[in-house]
Amino acid sequence: FEHLGFTPQGVARIDGLQPLQLVHPRRSQPGLAVPLQILDEHRDNKLQTLTEIIEAKVSNTPYNDGNKKILIFSAFADTTRYLYAQLDPLCRASGLTLAMISGSDKPKVNNAAIDHSFNSILSAFSPKAKLRHELPPEKQVDILIGTDCLSEGQNLQDCDCVINYDVQWNPVTLIQRFGRIDRIGSVNTRIKMINFFPDLALNEYLNLENRVKAKMVTA
């Protein structure tokens, strides 16, 4: 497992990766002056790090040769919408199919060849597990963003990388999320979980990272 911690001053850079341009959300909602200023100054280090991880994963496929698939979890539908909006231009420019599924929004996918339904998107993301056969690359989902509506009962083991964009109080949630790709029948020889932890002061207060690591070891 890989753990990334964030502080108010920023996050350590990942060696060998170049920063990417971020896309700014619409400036039509009141009360967003400070968050938008942060985005304008390119100081959303968490999103920046996520884009770098994605770029490295799809370019190098480090865990299993040729496997670009990434499953990104957030507990919040607002966060999934934000990530989809921010990552969509990057994915389109890189020829990647991006999809989003949450419990409160209609599923989204940036590929017209894939039906925008829940089951169609999951089948396009993990066709060997869901359909028992492969699909052409142009009809597959490469990156799936989802809430915990996907964390139970789904076979998504075509994917070899889970990213937890936020870490829940209950470490069992992480085990359930990781269980979507850590399943019997997976053809992957290596699988990876990457966790984004809160800033140091909050993390010390919650002792969250130690709880999560201890739970993952004993599971």
Image (tube, helix red, strand yellow):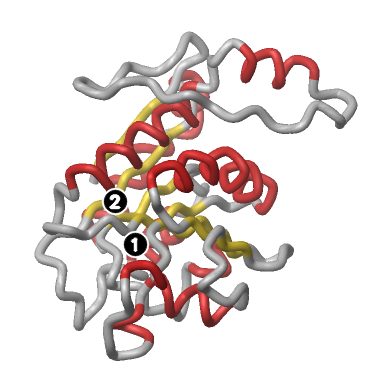
Q: Nearer the viewer, residue 217 or 189?
A: 189
CA–CA distance in space, label 1 to label 2: 7 Å
* Residue occupied by mark 2: 193
**Rendered residue at 12%/57% (across/down):** 65
**Rendered residue at 32%/37% (across/down):** 53
Figure check: 86 above or below 132: above
**x and y percent of residue 87 in the render?**
52, 42
**x and y percent of residue 207 in the render?**
42, 34
Three-letter amino acid code at the position of disc 1: Phe
- Tell me whether the residue at label 1 lies in contact with that at label 2, contact meaning CB atoms closer than 8 angstroms: yes
Which element type, helix, strand or loop, lies under badge 2? strand
Disc on res. 30: none
* Residue occupied by mark 1: 178
Three-letter amino acid code at the position of disc 2: Met
Q: Residue lying farthest right?
A: 30
Figure check: 61 above or below 201: below
**x and y percent of residue 7 in the render?**
46, 17
User: As drawn, is 163 to the left or to the right of 24?
Assistant: left
Classify the position of the C terminus by image quarter: bottom left
